[in-house]
Image (cartoon, grey):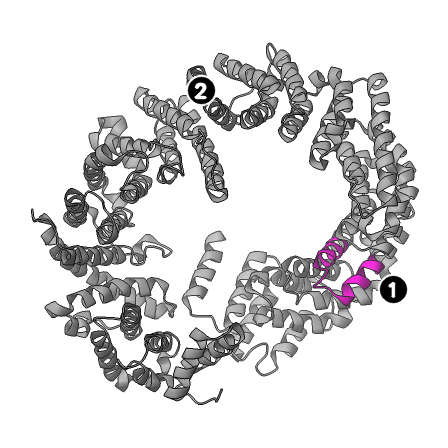
């Protein structure tokens, strides 16, 4: 394709982009993107906007105009601003009747022009659109101006100027919108044209009411006195009321108008200053509740024809409640305010929407999170909520029990996932109910269980009971909770319904910690729960195994007499059939054995260890098959952490099967998993076996480099460096092999790179004398680390910076030959060679270099030498930026925070971002955290 931006070439490129294969489309897109940024674009957009051109070409031209206004405003001389404005206005008027996609982009372009010019005279600029026939165009332009302000990147002075201008214009615009909505007070059914007019006016209201709302401080948003905006809010409510009154089914344009009106109400109620007018907020909530009452009375049914309208009302109620929760709770607590009560009743009705989610309704999930806000305000006001609150949250908990019930019909995969997430939200909400109701929550659940006639209903009761598992105080035994746990035990022991059995088992596991704290009925109930979980292994293996592990771990003393049965289950075909189930059962067995006396536990453990030994031999003989012996050994070893003598017995049995693991790359990670668990649990008790462990670790490191292997060697050096003389040799061999692996592909082996430098950093800081054993490797390691700070893999780059910083403090002479090049490399990374989120470890590296005792000028000389080059690290960094950076870095030897701010600001300078809104927000966030 020729590199000439003629109209013919541009039209051809647009045609290729929309009608060709992927490769040609990509080439056309690249060429068109380049064309958008060239100076000639200011000319060819007007030719491409001719009405005779195809819509695709017109849309490209409108998009190009917007791009030029955003990115190339400096190319327009000030004397040409008036001409450009007239051309944009003419184009907007020309496309008044469509295509809509082109008109919208042209309106956004006009908004961008207004903001770039920062004109204080909006009225004169938009006066050509004020004629009656062009009023929809005026509304569309007014709507996109705040949206463009919120999304547009501009220098801070320009943003401040535009904010002031728009703040002054906002009241007049909103008053105009109120006049536009005056027709809602007519008793006549609205025409389609009127509905469209209401929709545009509501969109404009919402846009101006959210102007600047996402900025750092409330005063930067538009100041809205809610009391003064109530007439506008009433008009927006009237839009919904009129459309609902005259339409049985609210859909299409009527639904869009209702949603836009309710969205604007949300914006008015959530404005930064709205919380300062609690009286007006309560009045607004009362009117929302009054609006919703007849709609709910008619349409709050399963599969409602107006489900989308009900969802919009629920969303509005949730938003306003979250913003004014304190006013609502205070008004109810002190005055019994009817409007506030009606608002909470509206939320409760939405939460309890008839039918199953997401089959029959799609709005109850919108409400779940708001109850935490309400509960928090209630408990802040009164630690002991009164009867009114207990009544409200009792009804809420009953609604949650009903909504937790799964529909009888089979759900599609997507709907099933929606239901799973929804039930988790309901479980979280149930905990908020417990904050108000306390133990009475269990009474409500037990009552619902007694009334239940189906397994689905019983499963819902257990699901909510499960949600309260972390809230029940220890050593406190509410009678209804004990009754519900007895129901869960009986259900787990005999129920054939899979979902009900699974939930019952999850309940038993969740309350295992509580059972362990009970002195009277706890042991008996825990023993019954253990037996029930064992009996359920055939029907629900995963849930039963997990429950058994939790119960055995928390109630180990009670599980000890059942150790033989648990060990037998772990060795049975049902226990060995699934690797995950096997690990849970081994965890349960280890917990029970740890609590049992040695005469009982030792023979049982030996039987388990022998079976795992056989599995390890089979796994070593055929590494291609997943035997799971290594994972089983690690799981059992972990569960024996309370009994180092049993853990030592286990390791002595399986040790002869481990040498073949060190010879096969696929078996090296499982081997290191076993070694890691063994060392962590046995600690000093593994010293007699350290020769065997070190031999395995060294051979495995030669066979295959992995992060877990380096972690094991680091653990050995840190724990036994002063006790076992073989540590230097082991460390040298492992580091040498890891360095060779990383040198060939540091980015591709980023996990190994990260583990290597993390290990070196820990050893350099905690066992610095072991750096002597790496003397011959230090030049190679320093070179590798200096190269790795440039990696885009954040973990590896951070680890490399961390070790270099530690080395600068412990052995500066080893770093000195590469220090100038390292400083230059760090500056390149700060300047843009690596992502912005990797600046912090580079700042810490500079701090370490500044603190180190290098002599001969040190960091000062290296910074001046590197930054003395022209256009280094980027052309954006001027001499005064560099000088300030050098001075600020050199004077800072103590505060990481202050140095990070200096480096962060210099990074923004080098990347050409200083002065942008992004830079302002970034630096403000740093200062806020500080």
Image x and y of residue 282, in percent:
22, 37
Q: Is residue 409 above or below residue 594?
A: below
Image x and y of residue 825, in percent:
66, 71
Residue lying furthest front in this view?
A: 409
Give the CA distance from mark 2 to mark 1: 70 Å
Q: Select label 2 or label 1 by which is in front.
A: 2
Badge 2 or badge 1: first in the primary sequence: 2
Which element carries disc 2, helix, strand or loop?
Answer: helix
Residue found 28% across the figure and 64% down from its top: 144
Residues 629 and 515: in front is: 629
Q: Is residue 751 magenta?
A: yes
- Is residue 273 visible in this depiction of the protein? no
Image x and y of residue 285, in percent:
23, 38
**The magenta stretch spans which residues?**
735-760
* Rendered image quadrant of residue 733: bottom right
Residue behind mark 2: 445
Image x and y of residue 351, in percent:
35, 33
Q: Residues within 10 Å of mark 2 (few under 14, many from 20)?
A: many
Q: Is residue 46 above or below residue 529?
A: below
Which element carries disc 1, helix, strand or loop?
Answer: helix
Residue behind mark 1: 776
Residue found 26% across the figure and 34% down from its top: 343
Q: Is residue 481 left or right of residue 576?
A: left
Q: Is residue 155 above or below residue 367?
A: below
* Rendered image quadrant of residue 214: bottom left
Residues 673 and 615: in front is: 615
Q: Is residue 59 magenta?
A: no
Q: Is residue 63 above or below residue 172?
A: below
């Amino acid at each position: 394709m020729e590199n000439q931006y003629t109209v013919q070439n541009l039209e051809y490129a647009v045609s290729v982009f929309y009608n060709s294969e992927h490769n040609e489309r990509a080439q056309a897109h690249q060429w068109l993107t380049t064309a958008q940024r060239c100076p000639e674009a200011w000319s060819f957009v007007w030719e491409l906007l001719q009405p005779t051109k195809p819509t695709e070409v017109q849309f490209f031209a409108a998009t190009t105009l917007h791009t030029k206004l955003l990115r190339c405003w400096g190319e327009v001389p000030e004397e040409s601003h008036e001409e450009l404005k007239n051309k944009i206005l003419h184009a907007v008027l020309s496309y008044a009747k469509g295509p809509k996609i082109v008109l919208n982009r042209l309106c956004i372009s006009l908004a961008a022009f207004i903001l770039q010019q920062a004109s204080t005279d909006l009225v004169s600029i938009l006066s050509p659109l004020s004629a009656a026939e062009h009023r929809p165009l005026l509304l569309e332009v007014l709507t996109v101006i705040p949206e463009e302000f919120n999304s547009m990147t501009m220098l801070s002075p320009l943003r401040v100027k535009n904010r002031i201008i728009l703040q002054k214009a906002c009241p007049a615009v909103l008053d105009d919108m109120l006049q536009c909505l005056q027709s809602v007070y007519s008793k006549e059914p609205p025409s389609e044209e009127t509905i469209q007019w209401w929709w545009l006016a509501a969109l404009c209201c919402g846009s101006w009411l959210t102007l600047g709302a996402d900025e750092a401080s409330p005063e930067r948003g538009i100041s809205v006195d809610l009391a003064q905006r109530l007439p506008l809010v009433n008009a927006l409510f009237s839009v919904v009321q009129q459309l609902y009154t005259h339409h049985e089914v609210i859909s299409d344009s009527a639904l869009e108008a209702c949603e836009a009106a309710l969205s604007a109400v949300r914006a008015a109620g959530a404005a930064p200053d709205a919380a300062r007018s609690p009286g007006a907020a309560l009045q607004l909530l009362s009117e929302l509740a009054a609006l919703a009452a007849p709609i709910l009375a008619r349409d709050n049914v399963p599969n409602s024809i107006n489900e989308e309208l009900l969802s919009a009302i629920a969303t509005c109620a949730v938003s306003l409640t979250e913003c004014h929760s304190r006013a609502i709770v205070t008004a109810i607590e002190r005055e019994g305010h009817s409007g506030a009560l009606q608002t909470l009743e509206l939320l409760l009705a939405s939460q309890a929407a008839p039918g199953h989610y997401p089959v029959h309704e799609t709005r109850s999930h919108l409400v779940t999170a708001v109850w935490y806000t309400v509960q928090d305000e209630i408990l802040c006001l009164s630690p002991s909520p009164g009867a009114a609150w207990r009544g409200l949250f009792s009804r809420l908990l009953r609604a949650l029990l009903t909504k937790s019930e799964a529909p009888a019909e089979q759900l599609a995969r997507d709907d099933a996932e929606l239901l799973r997430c929804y039930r988790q939200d309901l479980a979280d909400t149930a905990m908020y109910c417990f904050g108000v109701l306390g133990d009475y929550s269990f009474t409500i659940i037990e009552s619902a269980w007694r009334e239940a006639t189906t397994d689905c209903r019983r499963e819902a009761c257990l699901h909510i009971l499960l949600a309260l598992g972390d809230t029940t105080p220890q050593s406190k035994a509410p009678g209804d909770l004990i009754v519900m746990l007895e129901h869960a035990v009986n259900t787990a022991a005999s129920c054939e319904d899979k979902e009900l059995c699974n939930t019952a088992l999850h309940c038993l596991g969740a309350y295992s910690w509580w059972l362990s704290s009970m002195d009277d009925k706890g042991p008996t109930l825990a023993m019954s729960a253990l037996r029930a979980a064992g009996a359920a292994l055939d029907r629900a293996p995963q849930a039963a195994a997990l429950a058994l592990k939790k119960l055995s771990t928390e109630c180990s003393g009670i599980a000890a007499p059942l150790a033989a049965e648990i060990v037998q289950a772990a060795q049975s075909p049902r226990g060995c059939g699934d690797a995950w189930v096997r690990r849970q059962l081994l965890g349960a067995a280890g917990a029970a054995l740890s609590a049992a006396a040695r005469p009982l536990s030792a023979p049982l453990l030996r039987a388990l260890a022998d079976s795992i030994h056989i599995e390890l031999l089979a796994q070593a003989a055929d590494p291609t098959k997943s035997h799971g012996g290594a994972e089983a050994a690690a799981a059992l070893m972990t569960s024996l952490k309370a009994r180092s003598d049993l853990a030592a017995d286990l390791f002595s049995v399986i040790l002869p099967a481990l040498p073949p693991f060190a010879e096969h790359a696929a078996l090296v990670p499982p081997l290191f998993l076993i070694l890691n668990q063994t060392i962590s649990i046995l600690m000093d008790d593994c010293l007699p076996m350290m020769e065997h462990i070190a031999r395995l670790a060294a051979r495995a490191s030669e066979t295959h480099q992995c992060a877990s292997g380096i972690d094991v060697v680091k653990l050995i050096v840190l724990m036994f460096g002063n006790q076992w003389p073989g540590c230097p040799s082991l460390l040298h061999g492992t580091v040498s092999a890891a360095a060779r692996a990383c040198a060939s592909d540091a980015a591709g082996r980023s996990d190994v790179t990260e583990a290597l430098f993390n290990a070196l950093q820990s050893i350099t800081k905690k066992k610095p004398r072991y750096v002597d054993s790496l003397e011959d490797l230090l030049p190679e390691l320093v070179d590798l680390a200096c190269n790795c700070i440039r990696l885009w893999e954040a973990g590896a780059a951070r680890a490399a910076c961390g070790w270099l910083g530690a080395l600068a403090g412990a052995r500066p002479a080893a770093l000195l030959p590469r220090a100038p090049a390292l400083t230059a490399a760090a500056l390149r990374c700060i300047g843009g060679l690596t992502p912005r989120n990797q600046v912090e470890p580079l700042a810490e590296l500079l701090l370490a270099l500044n603190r180190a005792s290098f002599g001969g000028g040190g960091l000062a000389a290296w910074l001046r030498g590197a930054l003395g080059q022209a256009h280094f690290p980027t052309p954006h960094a001027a001499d005064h930026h560099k000088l300030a950076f050098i001075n600020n870095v050199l004077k800072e030897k103590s505060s990481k925070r202050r140095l990070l701010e200096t480096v962060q600001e210099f990074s923004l300078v080098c990347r050409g971002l200083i002065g942008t809104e992004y830079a302002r927000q970034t630096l403000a966030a740093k200062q806020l955290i500080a």
